[in-house]
Amino acid sequence: MFFELLKEAAFNLWSRKLRSGLAALGIFWGAYAVTLLMSIGQGVYRYNMTTIAPFTKTVFYVVLANTKQPYQGFSTGRKLFLSTDEVMFLPKVFPNILAITPIQSEPQSSFATAEKQINAELEGVSADYYRLTTQAYRGRTLTPADITQHRQVVFLTQTAKQLLYSHQDPLGQSISINNIYFKVIGYALKRSGISFNEVGADIPYSVYKDFYPDQVNVFLVSLATGADSTVFQKQITAYFARKLHFSPQDFDAIRIIDVTQFAKTFINILRLAKYFLLFCGLMSLMVGGIGIANMMYVLVKERTHEIGLKMALGAEPRWILLGIILETVLLVFSAGLLALICAAFSINMLHYADLPQWLGIPTLVFSDFVLILFFLLTTACSVGYFPARRAASLSPVNALSDRGS
């Protein structure tokens, strides 16, 4: 009986090809839109979650600024700084520090190869810098051995590599930075999600202080899992106040930026964006569903006499109900599956498009695929049930007297 109803549903839809096609178009566009938007949202979410992954743990960006209050005979406006050795000594003072790097900077440094020259930022950092930022790279990053042995090696940002070497491979080549030669050991393939040097390069902080003043007023620090970030901020503020002789109440003298809070806020924004894209797609699907519901109501009205005849011949209301719902489900799923196939093709084409980096790679994951099928089934049953219930509740006598006028 079920297969007979299915064949009849397919015949009824085929006999009204134009009307069925136009109604299915709304479902097709809705399913296509929701699939494409969910895949784009998934790509954006995955890419940005990867780039901010190091900052999901407790990470602080510490800036030593100028004093704003007189203290212990010192006047206001005094510039605060540490040496690199003092920065790298902090894990011994605070054992809960997991990773730390000074960030020393020469903003307008001259980078020159045999063919090109640019002005960019030069940074002196530790090997931990690459644990605290996310970068896909080729070659290698700085190592503890580079620091201790004062190796004149350099790691280029993606932009610096493109400007200086274009499509050439710079690994192992020499580059002049402020008339000092360094060996290129690696370069970034993409920018980090939270970057401190967009155009330039990194060298070991030990080499940096060989040529430039050993003054650090910015450093990045990560705490071990379970460490109390609030207690740490109070402790390190008090420590620097004692060491550098400024008032513990001079909150402008030291700025401790909790990068983790920024990362959490950013993650929430990404989730909201993902859900918003899903919502937009579902609204398109709902509009298509309303169109099909209206069509089914019209079909029930047109076929009232036919339905009455079936019921007079002994057809049970539940089979009338099931027949109308089957027509709706068949129409919705045919359009929906075609939309999924077209969306999958479009997603594959997007992999070859020159998309902005922050969009990531559009991806349709299995859970999203199941969710879309669930929404299609829900839409089909919802928009088909009410017209079907109306048809099944008809009185055979009244239905037979109706000629579909």
Image (spheres, rainbow, N blue to C red):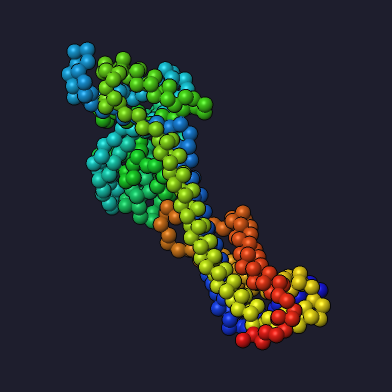
Location of residue 76 in the rendering, given as x and y in whole percent from the top left corner:
18, 21
What residue appears at the point 72 percent right and 84 percent down from the top-left corner? 400
Is residue 265 shown above or below 63?
below
Location of residue 266 in the rendering, given as x and y in whole percent from the top left corner:
43, 44
What residue appears at the point 64 percent right and 82 percent down from the top-left corner? 302
Relative horizontal placement of residue 124, taking residue 314 as reference (left or right): left
What residue appears at the point 79 percent right and 80 percent down from the top-left corner? 312
Q: Quadrant of the N terminus?
A: bottom right
Relative horizontal placement of residue 112, taking residue 290 as reference (left or right): left
Could you say which is closer to the camera, residue 146 or residue 320?
Answer: 320
Residue 356 seen in render: yes
Is residue 316 shown above or below 68?
below
Quadrant assignment, res 101: top left
Q: Quadrant of the C terminus?
A: bottom right
Relative horizontal placement of residue 240, taking residue 34 as reference (left or right): left
Could you say which is closer to the camera, residue 151 or residue 68?
Answer: 68
Residue 78 seen in render: no
Location of residue 276 in the rendering, given as x and y in whole percent from the top left corner:
47, 55
Location of residue 8 in the rendering, given as x and y in whole percent from the top left corner:
73, 79
What residue appears at the point 52 percent right and 28 percent down from the top-left corner? 225
